[in-house]
């Protein structure tokens, strides 16, 4: 089993990475392989709403989004991490995830369906719960079980060293890793027992103006 962790910060080894690494270390202790994927610090183009992903099976803009999509197909669980910028997720992770989720759904792959996901955020001070709510929307629209810790999944600090001093936040990252590992093992046990996942239903679209 493997969990793919997405670092949506412009800093490769900053505060968000510090939180993700704590989750990853705990998952590794639980026997779950991990990989931290960085979105990079270059601009991520927004979705063009061109619909080409339905034909291509990937985004028409060939950048790190498609690289992530390929890795995501083989993963069993996901952790999305972002710093808080102006009480919201980073300017890179939002277009990144929007294109990832639109491409996999429009192409009919639904690679995230019924796989567990969770979000973690880092902030100097405030805006964390709003950002978590924003990121959790991606899981909920893709039929993904959302994994929780014992508190909202956040760490505080201006530098990685300060984040490491956030004892409560770092403890929650470890608990989050344990809970993700437990869910994955339960899912694996269910599959061995022949418990069949819910049947996929073709989406029904109801427009408000007819």
Image: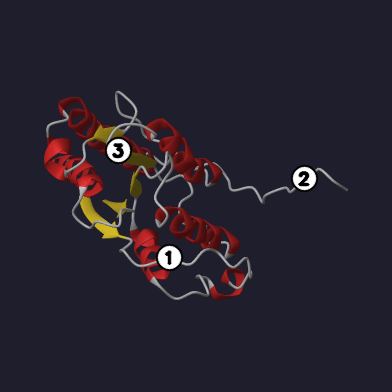
Q: Is residue 104 above or below residue 147?
A: below
User: Which residue is disc 1 drawn over?
Assistant: 44
User: Which residue is disc 3 drawn over?
Assistant: 123
Tell me if mark 2 has few (under 14), some (14-19) or many (20+) residues whose alpha carbon lies within 10 angstroms of its own: few
User: Answer yes or no: do the residues labelled 1 and 2 have beta carbons within 8 Å?
Assistant: no
State the SS at label 1.
loop
State the SS at label 3.
strand
Q: Position of residue 140 (x, y in %)?
A: 51, 40
Outermost residue on the right side: it is: 210
Total label count? 3
Q: CA distance from mark 3 to mark 1?
A: 22 Å
* Mark before the other along the chain sequence, 1 or 2: 1
Q: CA distance from mark 1 to mark 2?
A: 31 Å
User: Which residue is disc 2 drawn over?
Assistant: 206
Tell me if mark 3 has few (under 14), some (14-19) or many (20+) residues whose alpha carbon lies within 10 angstroms of its own: many
In which image quadrant can residue 38 be found? bottom left
Q: Position of residue 89 (x, y in %)?
A: 41, 46
User: Answer yes or no: do the residues labelled 2 and 3 have beta carbons within 8 Å?
Assistant: no
């Amino acid at each position: 089993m493997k969990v793919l962790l997405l670092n949506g910060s412009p800093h490769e080894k900053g505060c968000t990475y510090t939180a993700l690494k704590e989750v990853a270390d705990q998952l590794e202790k639980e026997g779950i392989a991990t990989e931290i994927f960085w979105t990079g610090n270059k601009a991520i183009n927004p979705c063009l709403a061109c619909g080409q992903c339905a034909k291509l099976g990937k985004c028409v803009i060939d950048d790190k989004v498609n690289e992530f999509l390929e890795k995501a197909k083989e993963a069993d669980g996901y952790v999305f991490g972002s710093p808080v910028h102006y009480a919201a997720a980073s300017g890179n992770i939002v277009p990144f995830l929007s294109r990832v989720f639109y491409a996999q759904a429009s192409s009919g792959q639904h690679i995230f369906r019924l796989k567990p996901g969770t979000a973690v955020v880092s902030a100097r001070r405030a805006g964390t719960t709003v950002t978590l709510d924003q990121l959790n929307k991606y899981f909920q629209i893709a039929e993904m079980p959302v994994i929780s810790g014992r508190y909202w999944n956040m760490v505080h600090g201006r530098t990685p060293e300060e984040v490491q001093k956030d004892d409560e936040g770092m403890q929650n990252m470890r608990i989050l890793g344990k809970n993700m590992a437990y869910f994955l093992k339960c899912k694996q046990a269910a599959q061995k027992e022949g418990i069949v996942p819910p049947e996929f239903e073709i989406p029904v679209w109801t427009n408000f103006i007819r």
